[in-house]
Amino acid sequence: MASLTKFKKTAQGLLEATANKIVDDFVIALKEKFELDEDDLNNVIDSFKKSAIAIEKKKRPASEYNIFIKETIQRLKAENPESTENLMKLATAEWNKHKAAAAAASSSETEEKPEKPAKASKPKASKAKKADE
């Protein structure tokens, strides 16, 4: 396990050193090719950093609500292409019906499940019986 930790640290260090070398070479190439001064160069680098940070951020997966609303709005648009007003209101109303139906189905499933019988407990030997033995 210790060797794995050491490997990770070494690999991370090499990766950072390589990345720094690439960035340094890139900066030199930009300076030479485009004859940029330090301020212009810093602006370019800042914009690249912002792009890289945006790429690193992961979007969380869409919720059941988001997926339902998206699909419902698309369906409503297809059914009524000339009527684009109140689509969100209609989709939300359908979502509320969907959730109520899901809740009703969920509660009826729990009612239909038979309850597990209680486990029979073993009779405990009395203290007097133990004393006799």
Image (tube, rainbow, N blue to C red):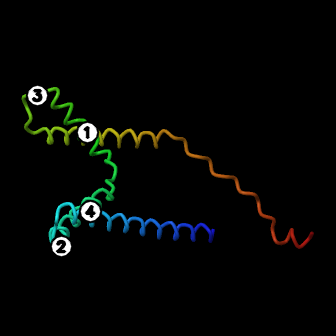
Q: Position of residue 121 (x, y in %)?
A: 71, 57
Numbered tag placed on residue 36 in the rendering: none
User: Which secondary structure lies at badge 4?
Assistant: helix
**Viewer-nearest of discs 4 and 1:** 4
The residue singled out by tag 4 in the image is 29
| Relative height, residue 14 to residue 94 (above, below) | below
The residue singled out by tag 1 in the image is 97
- Dot 2 or dot 3: first in sequence order is 2
Q: Amino acid at mark 4?
A: Ala
Q: CA distance from mark 2 to mark 1?
A: 60 Å
Q: CA distance from mark 3 to mark 1?
A: 23 Å
User: Which secondary structure lies at badge 1?
Assistant: helix
Res 26 → quadrant? bottom left
Numbered tag placed on residue 38 in the rendering: 2
**Residue positioned 38% across, 38% down in the render:** 105
Q: Amino acid at mark 1?
A: Lys
Residue 82 falls left or right of residue 54: left
Q: Position of residue 118 (x, y in %)?
A: 63, 51
The residue singled out by tag 3 in the image is 81
